Amino acid sequence: MWLSYQISHRLLNNKIPGVALAVIVGLGLAFLGEKKGIADLPLFSGMALFGGAMLRDFSVVATAMGADIEKIKSAGIAGLISLVVGVFFSFLLGVIIAFAMGYTDPESLATIGAGACTYIVGPVTGTALGVSSEVIAISIATGVVKTIVATVGTPLLAKSISLNNPHAAIVFGGLVGTTSGVTAGLAATDPKLVPYGALTATFYTGLGCLLCPSLFYFVLRFLF
């Protein structure tokens, strides 16, 4: 974290936030091991807990303590619309990518499309539809790329898209969806916006897990 912030401040003039660089470095370190990433090395075995999903989810939930319920209510309809639009657009984009890669069966298309929603929705959909581990891996990779783009791009685009208030953060979380990318990107933009973006991003994952292996899959079966 310290090194990432130094590079961001001294070399990049804060154009890319230090937290975004740290996330990229962390993803790179994950390749050092075979099963648990850097935690496979005895010296760093504690990272299996310290960097695990449990503490990540705990920290996301903990940010809700700073949320203003009245501001959340004021964005109710806009947040709902952003969720539906966000899930549909991401899924459609993922299906187009999968089709361009040569996949034509509805199961693979639905799985990779779901991965474009988040790297959690992809495996859930793939497992439900019984696709190969190769397709599930592609769906996860698609979701990870989206997370990195959201993490790095959010603070760079925040000013131009007026991402500077809770209402905008709620809509942004619903449109982008990936909880990891949204929370990291908003943390680099303004930590006070994190609970609002994380709120709709979390619902986004649940909505994706509901729609992708059911309604969206049946639509693809009808089309293909």
Image (tube, grey):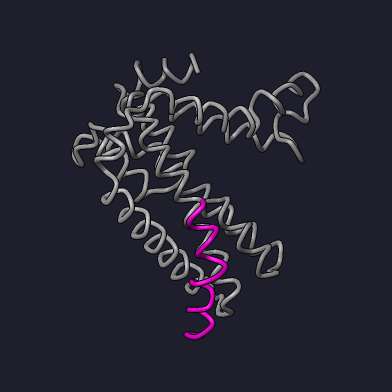
Q: Is residue 54 left or right of residue 65?
A: right
Location of residue 84 with respect to 92 vertically, above or below: above
Magenta-colored span: 206-224
Query: Percent x, y for residue 63?
Result: 45, 26
Query: Percent x, y for residue 38?
Result: 70, 29
Query: Percent x, y for residue 160?
Result: 18, 39
Magenta stretch, overall SS: helix
Location of residue 215 with respect to 3 vertically, above or below: below
Q: Is residue 158 left or right of residue 180?
A: left
Residue at 25%, 38% (x, y): give it.
167
Query: Percent x, y for residue 82?
Result: 32, 53
Give whichever of 14, 207 is nearer the camera.
207
Give whichever of 163, 105 is nearer the camera.
163
Residue at 26%, 50% (x, y): give it.
78
Residue 49, quarter of picture: top right
Residue at 76%, 40% (x, y): give it.
35
Magenta-span inclusion, residue 220: yes
Give whichever of 219, 34 is nearer the camera.
219
Q: Is residue 195 left or right of residue 24?
A: left
